Amino acid sequence: MTTLTAAHQELFHRTPDECFDSFETLYDYCRRQRAQSHDLWEPPERVLLTHDMTLCVNEDGTELRLNDWSFSQLCRMAGVSKETINRLSAKTASKALEETLPRSGKPLQLLQTGDAVRSVHGVAYTRLWNDELLDVVQEFASDFSPPQKAYDDVHTGLYCGEQDLFAFLIDPGGWTEINGEAFAPGFFVWNSEVGRRSLGIQTFWFQRVCANHIVWDATEVTEFSRKHTAGVREGLDEIRRMIETLVKYRDDRRDGFARIMQIAMKESLGHDAEEVTKKLSAEKIPRQLIKEALEIARRKGGYTIFALVDALTHLSQDVRYAGDRVELDARIGKLMALAMAA
């Protein structure tokens, strides 16, 4: 089993204004941001840097401010260190970028939101909006929700900032058994409208999420990512398929576990105390625990598999040493397999 730390890492670099209390508020924010944004396709010669380090675009001379990310992208396009540019005066810096930016003739793709340029790309980049990804999540994982808030009661697992989106969702009602242990399904999804990171998803089954949003004891971990090139929307099809598969496995396992529980609640482990004792002894359950469990099960109406497992699980908590208790719980858990064979 694996420990997953992606949500933990997000927690420690997200500011409170990037945190969202629910999937609905995150989705609404992404929809509004998309509605307020649009692409500008401009020939390089018509994108000018002013002495105030703003971009002058369009024939009317509209000036747009750069944020940290779009400024970093311009520096990379120019092949000039951002640290070097930051040490220059605004006038010198704008002149340096003007002289080093490529003039290939191919248009630049600028993402404008309000009076700011959020990103600068060439023609090879294909944008995928955050709400397009969330549409898929909403349609195929509507019963998933974020985990409990982190230790600071601020960070939620649902984040969207200037550069990217990250969402951590689980199904709190999806607990089922895998190889005799309890797991629930969950997944991470991520995207960036400005080229900060790829489009992607990681699905898994987990046993516990701590207050630092570390996912403990994860199994069946699968991951997919796609760069923002011409085929990026095909990535949504794969994300849709992975979520559908996760939900199907959840339903199949939950239904299968429910059937086993129904059998366990009806199927007797033996006709009398002597026969039950022999079967439990064969599973190496201590004699004293068997005697106490038989009495508890008898008072509850009979020696069903479920009644005996429930009684033994309760009694095992009084075992003094943790190692002995874990070993005993494993033996008790195997008794549910008798219901499958019934």
Image: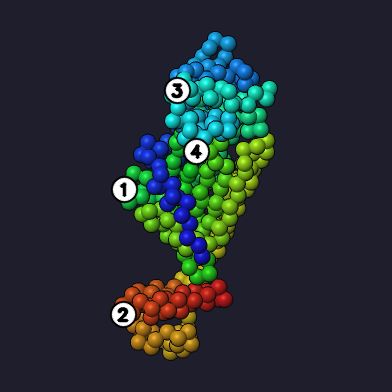
Task: From the viewer's side, name the closer residue of 51 and 159.
Answer: 51
CA distance for labels 1 and 3: 40 Å
Q: Label 3: state its secondary structure.
A: helix
CA distance for labels 1 and 2: 35 Å
Question: In the image, 119: left or right of 157?
Answer: right
Q: Residues within 10 Å of mark 1 (few under 14, many from 20)?
A: few
Where does the image place residue 36, in percent across and percent down from the top left?
Answer: 49, 24
**Label 3: which residue?**
90
The amino acid pointed to by label 4 is Asp
Closer mark to the observer between disc 1 and disc 2 = 1
**Label 1: which residue?**
152
Q: From this view, report whether residue 89 is shown above or below residue 127.
A: above
Label 4 vs 1, first from the N-terminus: 1
- Residue 175 visible in the snapshot: no
Residue at image x 50%, y 44%? 142
CA distance for labels 2 and 4: 50 Å
Closer mark to the observer between disc 2 and disc 3 = 3
Q: Label 2: state its secondary structure.
A: loop
Where does the image place residue 48, in percent across and percent down from the top left?
Answer: 55, 18
Q: Which mark is residue 320?
A: 2
